[in-house]
Structure formats: C-alpha cells, structure tokens
Image (cartoon, coloured by chain):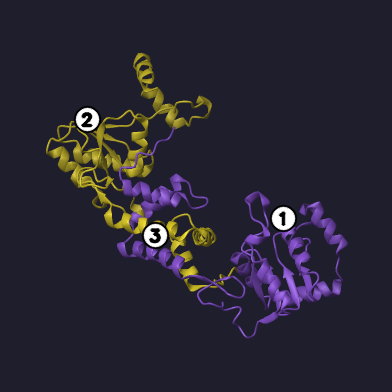
Chain colours: A purple, B yellow
Amino acid sequence: MIQHNYSSKLLEEAVEEFATLPGIGKKSALRLVLHLLKQEDKDVEQFGNTILRMKHEIMTCRECHNISDTEVCHLCSDPYRDKKTICVVESIRDVMSVENTQQYTGVYHVLGGIISPMDGIGPADLTIESLEEKVKNGQCTEVILALSTTMEGDTTNFYIYRRLKNYQVTVSTLARGVAIGDDLEYADEVTLGRSILNRTSFEETFKNSYHGT
Amino acid sequence: MIQHNYSSKLLEEAVEEFATLPGIGKKSALRLVLHLLKQEDKDVEQFGNTILRMKHEIMTCRECHNISDTEVCHLCSDPYRDKKTICVVESIRDVMSVENTQQYTGVYHVLGGIISPMDGIGPADLTIESLEEKVKNGQCTEVILALSTTMEGDTTNFYIYRRLKNYQVTVSTLARGVAIGDDLEYADEVTLGRSILNRTSFEETFKNSYHGT
C-alpha cells in the first residue's frame, strides 16, 4: 500500500487539486507541483492568475456557442464567412480541427456535447433548441452534421435530423470512407463496405483532391 | 502542419501556461483547460488560489531542506526521531519513498538534486555545504547515502564521501542486491555479481525480513 506522507499541508492541497484534472494521478500531480515550486515566483503567479482570469472572463459566442473573448466570436462576426451554411460540431476542439483543414468557409454551431444516456447527457443539455431556432428563422440553407462516427454521434445526428427535417433546409453529414493514405488491407469492413456503396465519380474526387492540397 | 486557431486569446494563454508543465503538450493542455472551464467557478478559483498560496507560503526546512509549512519540518522536530542518523536523499519524493517503508527512524537531508554536469548541476548547487556543517559540528554519527543507483548518483555519493571521510562519522549506502520478489533469471549481471560478493549471513537476512513484514 502506498501512503503519501506529504511533509507540507499546502503541498498536499496543491497535489490534490492537480489530481482532479483528467488523466493526472497523484504521482504526476506531485511532479507538476514540484516543477512549479522550482519556477520563478512571477511565472507561478502568472500561471495561477491566468487560470482565474480565464474562468471569469471567457464567454461563449451568442451565435454559435463557441468559446470567445467577445459576445460574438471572430468567426460569426467575419463578413467573409457564409452565414447560410452551419457546421454542427460537438466541441470547440472540433471547430479547431475543421478550421485547420482550411476547406470550410461557413459558420459553426457548437453543441457542447453529444447525446449519451450513459453519461446522463440528453438533448436538453445541448444547444439543439437554439440550432432549431436558427433554422426556423430561415437563417441558413444547409446544416452539416460533423459529429464523431460513434454510436453517440450517430444517435445525435439522427435526433437533430428529425428535429430539422420539416424545415426548408438541407441536412448533410461528413463523407464516410477510406481515409486518405490508408492501406485498403487495413481498412475496417464497415467503412470499406460503405465506401463502395457510396462511391463517387472519379472526376469529382480528382477535382476535389486537386483543390484540397 | 497543425495550426491552433484558438477562438479566444484567454483560452490560448491558459493552454500555453499548462503546456509549460513537464510532460504536457498543447493537446493535453487544451483538454485540461476545457475541463477546468466546465467546472464550477468556486472550484476553479480554489485551484488557482491553491497554486498561488503554495508558491508564496511553502518553506524549506532550516534543518533538512525538505519542503515544509513551518521553519523546521515535522520530521526534524519529532522528538522520537534519531537525530544522530542522517539519510541523504535527492528530493522530497525520496523522503516520501523512504518514509513509506516505515523502516527508518532517523532524519533526512535533502540535497535538492544530484551532481550532473550534463544538466549543469555542480556540488555548489546542492546542500552539501550544510551537510558537511552538521557532520563537522558532531551533530550525527552516521550518514546514509540513499541516492539513485545511476552514474550521477554514484558520482554524488563519491563526492560526498570524500568531503566527509576525514570527520568522525560512519558513511553508509543502501544495500544493493537482487530485489525481493525478483526472479534470478531476470536479474542483471552487475546486480547479481555484487549481490554474490556482498552476500550476507542467512540468519541476519532472515531476522531482518521477519521484522520487515
């Protein structure tokens, strides 16, 4: 049995705080705290203050629910962005992933999670209501569902589709298929099967991959 | 190339701060920050404040240089501890390891590192001076060198031994040998070789292992 005989109550408290973070156990937490103790006073002060400021000052965009420093985020307020196309994603991390492709010029809608009964997350915990509102007001012509290809992602896709299908809007999802650079031998059967069924014209694929790189 | 298009300057700053911690990259840092953003205000405040308080209020023990909340740590001020025996360790983590064995009743001396020319750490960066002072004053009868069995650890052991050998003090090191529970087949040759040369009386070993468990 490993006991932790911290020689300092303050040290112990700091370790306990770090150990509440995801993926960080007591041992890593101690390592991080001892690292911070070795740093300059002003660096540690900045670290602590940045955390406090972040929590107090960060806002979520009124339009897309993305994390933002302003009431409307820089994507939603960008005049060159196509406001008629909305890409629905789970979290801010997915916004960053799609932005990194530099292929998308529409705006986003951050759900804040996906429907997952196991984790107690239902449709009411997400920003689906406000998405429906936008569609109802005729603010957009296309909604792209860009959720994970998991059970929960598919459930959420289907739920949103049902909520939106009676409005004048195109609902699309990301193309599913063999990843670029993947060896066919190692592609899983379900993906390979779907990519045969949903095969695309060679000319179109060629044109897109040419634009894409 | 992965770009990071943070939608918020504050978010980016917080991620940068977390990414300065050892073993935490940009991706993990973002995960930690998003986790903190989801927590209650008061929990995040406590997190930030604990870090600030820790840095400002933690002291190092005047006697053994261990981390402490008081000027003299709880081990050095414990009247039941044998002040005549000093166990020299690299860091507070090693103090915790030795304490966990519940086999040691002496006090400690924390070096704050080991001699490592590669990292630019020389004898003057460690608390060897103050250790020599204690020995010179006749404060102790035995110094146990409990450093890692690495090149740097051995160098440091040898350096300290040379500094102390002219004083009236016994300098000992941890026993090196086959670990308990280890299969002989997998013990390395150096360890096995030394454990044959430094073999101990069976009766003594038996007595110790009986007390030890």
Residue B69 percent across, percent down from the top left:
26, 48
Q: Amino acid at mark 1?
A: Thr
Residue B149: tell me if it is visible: yes
For label 1, the SS is: loop
- Near mark 3 (Cα within 10 A), the count class, few <14, some 14-19 or many ≥20, is many
Please report the residue visible at 34 percent of the width from the left and 63 percent of the height from the top. Answer: A45
Q: In the rendering, which numbered label is found on residue B48? A: 3
Residue B21: tell me if it is visible: no
Relative vertical location of residue A14 with respect to residue B182 in this rendering, above or below: below
For disc 2, the chain is B
Q: In the rendering, which numbered label is found on residue B80? A: 2
Quadrant showing the C terminus of chain A:
bottom right
For label 3, the SS is: helix
- Furthest residue in direction left, as rendered: B137
**Which-is-in-front pick, marks 2 and 3?**
3
Residue A88 percent across, percent down from the top left:
68, 68
Q: Amino acid at mark 3?
A: Gly
Which residue is the site of mark 1? A150
Is A180 placed left or right of A193 in the picture?
left
Residue A24 percent across, percent down from the top left:
49, 49
